[in-house]
Amino acid sequence: MEQLLNAMAIFSIGLFVIVLFSVRRAHIRVEYSVSWLIAAATLFVLSRSSALLEWLSQRVGITYPPLALLLIASGVFLVVFYRFSIRISDLKDANIALAQRLAILEYQLHATHESKQTPSQG
Amino acid sequence: MNDSLLILIPAYNEEGAVGSVVREVQREVPGTPVLVIDDCSGDATVQAARDAGAQVLCLPTHLGLGGCVQAGYKLAYELGYDYVIRVDGDGQHDPRDVPRAFQALKSSGVEMVIGSRYVDKKQEFTSFSRGFGIVLFRLILRPILGKWVMDPTSGFVGVNRDALAVFSKSFPLEYPEIEALVVLKRKAFHFEEIPCNVRPRQTGRSSITAVKSVYYIMHVLLGVFINILKYEGRRR
């Protein structure tokens, strides 16, 4: 049990550091790092606090605390993935609308430009 | 503009076929503007379409069929067209059917006309998976639409301005044909099928493989049921 909790603590520290470096290098925007940092902090606290983990395990009816930690970790990441799925869908919708609008504006600009040029050519 | 018609040709890497499609359409409906929507092709589709005399709407990124067609619908709506008929850029749709589709659109009072390979005549399915998909969607759509649609995957489609207004705001992005029927149904619009001729592709080959067919069926099934559950007023 102790090994698993230690591994989880190392994993959460690693996740925390990677996310911070990604934000520093502008690979992840600050607003999207918050979910990951909260997830990493939650996992670290649970893996280091046996009393809290055992209390949570009893609340959800699981006799083996590390299993509760894995379930909680899975739940936390599912929430993060769900949030990002919503965000990606929004961004894709916006991207499509922008691409369509850009194409239409370019078309109309081209048409206006041509109609202005036509009299002088004739 | 009254009774104004725009021919819409979505095209992606169709340099070998799009020019002849444009010329054939212009021969069948002389004087009708033809708009090719280029879905960010990597070949000379745009030049081939322009050389044939079409206007071209160039998308800056590849959006897929639904996003490509919707861009054309948006432009047609903003330019004030009353009717739009979509013909695929691969040459499979016979432009000789365009005048009949336009006539049906004007005289029937329905919001959408579908060119169907399987109404009035027994055209064979091009493959088992395609035939299975079409029969499956006929059965699924029957209770939803309240009538049979014999060729729900047909891309040869004509719409009037009411449908244009709806599709400009809400149009399925991938495999749009079947979901578009459900979108129309939500608006209590009507459609009609007219017989049409489908020819072999002029160039290239279909991107639909057996694996993609399964994905297609799953994707469209989900899309249909989500569309049924959707409430009005959604952003897309």
Image (tube, coloured by chain):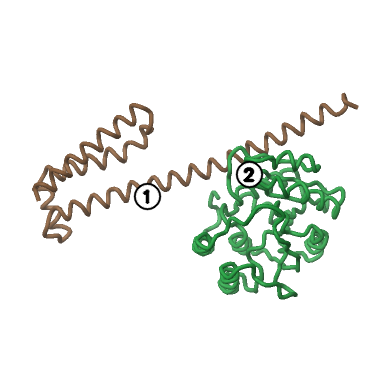
Chain colours: A brown, B green
Q: Are marks 1 and 2 in contact (CB under 8 Å)?
A: no
- Name the residue beneath numbered marker 2: B39
Secondary structure, mark 1, is: helix
Residue A47 location (% of width, % of height)? 14, 45
Asked whether, in this view, residue B223 is left or right of residue A25, the answer is right
Furthest toward the right, the residue is A122
Asked whether, in this view, residue B86 is left or right of residue A14, the answer is right
Query: Does residue B192 lie above or below A64 as drawn?
Result: below
Query: Does residue B128 lie above or below B91 as drawn?
Result: below
Secondary structure, mark 2, is: loop
Mark 1 → mark 2, Cα distance in angstroms? 30 Å
Residue density around tag 2, few if under 14, some if 14–19, many if 20 or more, within 10 Å:
many
* Badges 1 and 2, same chain: no
Residue A36 location (% of width, % of height)? 30, 40
- Name the residue beneath numbered marker 1: A82
1 or 2: mark nearer the eye: 2
Foreground: B85 or B78?
A: B85
| Chain under callout 1 | A
Residue B124 location (% of width, % of height)? 67, 72
Q: Which residue lies at the image location 43% right of the left edge and 44% below the top edge?
A: A87
Query: Does residue B110 lie above or below B47 as drawn?
Result: below
Furthest toward the top, the residue is A120
Query: How many badges with numbers are in the image?
Result: 2
